[in-house]
């Protein structure tokens, strides 16, 4: 999902992971990647980002992630809610603003390293970067968490090193009402869904969701809501059926992703076409968002998003390594071949 939501999603970066990683519970590469320090630094940073997001989703309970860029970055234009750079602090900004139904708002920075001594130094750099951004509503700083997540990759050969992850997570105090905080959370969810839908071929709905977050004008907001509702009703929703005990109970709007990246014009692949992708070993995977979650995001219904998350959490099987995977925030990842699934 991190690659899908970032620029360059068509490159299909995720296709390299299975070939490079050992099939174990530890995040360990089969062998060292590259010889030069420049290559190792670049790759450890890239994979450190993936691990940090997975950690933030699994253990910190975040479900919505929006990349921080071009501050001040509006999240709710009508309330003047935004992510902005802390005055007087220069340098690169942190990676994400995040929210989860069981977590407060957060600023998250990820760092990877290949240092033999572990990720301690990387963690300190990550937290300094996380300190450069803040959440502001109506000119007042909100309450949120700052997370710095640093990892050191493990390598099986030529020398065995174990993978490590370090986390720093102090609070940031603020003076913003609970209602304003919930409105900000809706904005993060809208941007999260928008960035997922665009590469999957749903640009109209994506544009409307973004417009709802950035416009300060009520009439333009109302128009964006109407366009989002229309796009939702006209969407090509699919039903997913898998052999596993747990499958999505709601219709999904999304698209197919193969080894080479998203297939944005293949939102309605037939069963025969899905089987063809499997036979060609292209590992087709459907990424989709539940209709009810999209509707709740459009209507700004945080309570519905929270109740859906609780329902999904309780329904998840004990063994989460098999079958379709849910982020409990409304998004599903369904591997057609591995999950023995089909879309209708």
Image: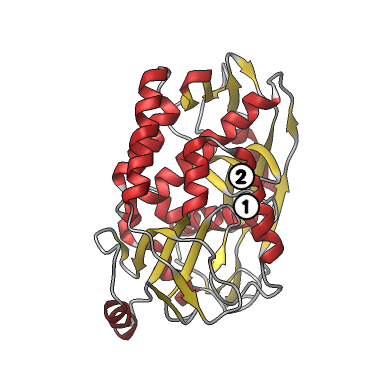
Q: Secondary structure at mark 2?
A: helix
* Front-lying residue, 246 or 287: 246
| Left or right: 85 in relation to 269 | right
Q: Position of residue 273 (x, y in %)?
A: 27, 77
Rendered view: 299 above or below 19: above
Q: Residue furthest top?
A: 139
Q: Are marks 1 and 2 in contact (CB under 8 Å)?
A: yes
Compared to residue 334, the image places residue 99 above or below, namely: above
Q: Where's the C terminus, which quadrant?
A: bottom left
Residue at the spot 35% in from the left edge and 61% down from the top edge: 255
Q: Where is 294 relative to 47, above or below?
A: above
Please give the name of the residue rendered at 47% of the width and 75% of the height, measured from the top-left corner. 241
Can residue 224 be seen here? The reply is yes
Residue that numbered label 2 is attached to: 304
Q: Secondary structure at mark 1?
A: helix
User: Is residue 7 visible to us here?
Assistant: no
228 sits to left or right of 80 = left
Q: Residue at x 37, y 39 (%)?
A: 228
- The percent coordinates of residue 54 (x first, y second) are 59, 57
Q: What is the x, y in percent for residue 141?
A: 65, 20
Residue 187: x %, y % from top left: 51, 34
> On the image, numbered disc 1 is attached to which residue?
308
In this view, the residue in front, 108 or 19, is 108
Residue at 41% x, 50% y: name it: 196
Q: Quadrant of residue 100?
A: top right
* Nearest to the observer: residue 337 or residue 86: 337
């Amino acid at each position: 999902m991190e690659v899908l939501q970032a620029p360059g999603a068509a490159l299909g970066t995720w296709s390299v992971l299975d070939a490079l990683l050992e099939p174990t519970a530890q995040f360990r590469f089969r062998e060292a990647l590259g010889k030069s320090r420049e290559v190792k630094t670049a790759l450890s940073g890239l994979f450190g980002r993936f691990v940090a997001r997975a950690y933030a989703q699994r253990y910190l309970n975040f479900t919505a992630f929006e990349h921080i860029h071009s501050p001040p970055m509006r999240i709710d234009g009508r309330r003047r809610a935004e992510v902005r750079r802390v005055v007087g602090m220069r340098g690169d900004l942190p990676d994400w603003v995040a929210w989860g139904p069981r977590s407060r708002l957060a600023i998250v920075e990820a760092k990877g390293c290949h240092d033999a001594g572990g990720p301690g130094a990387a963690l300190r750099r990550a937290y300094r970067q996380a300190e450069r951004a803040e959440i502001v509503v109506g000119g007042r700083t909100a309450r949120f968490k700052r997370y710095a997540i640093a990892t050191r990759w493990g390598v099986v050969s030529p020398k065995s090193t174990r993978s490590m992850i370090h986390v720093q997570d102090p609070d940031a105090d603020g003076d913003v009402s609970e209602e304003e905080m919930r409105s900000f959370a809706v904005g993060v969810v809208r941007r999260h869904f928008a960035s997922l839908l665009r590469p999957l071929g749903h640009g109209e709905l994506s544009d409307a969701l973004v417009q709802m977050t950035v416009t300060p004008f009520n009439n333009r907001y109302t128009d964006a809501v109407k366009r989002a509702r229309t796009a939702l009703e006209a969407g090509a929703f699919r039903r997913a059926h898998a052999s596993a005990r747990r499958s999505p109970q709601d219709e999904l709007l999304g698209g197919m992703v193969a080894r080479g990246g998203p297939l944005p014009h293949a939102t309605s692949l037939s069963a025969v076409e899905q089987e063809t992708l499997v036979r060609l070993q292209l590992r087709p995977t459907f990424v989709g968002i539940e209709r009810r979650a999209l509707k709740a995001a459009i209507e700004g219904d945080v309570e519905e998003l929270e109740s859906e998350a609780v329902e999904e959490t309780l329904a998840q099987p004990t063994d989460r390594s098999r079958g379709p995977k849910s982020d409990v925030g409304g998004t599903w990842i369904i591997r057609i071949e591995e999950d023995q699934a089909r879309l209708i």
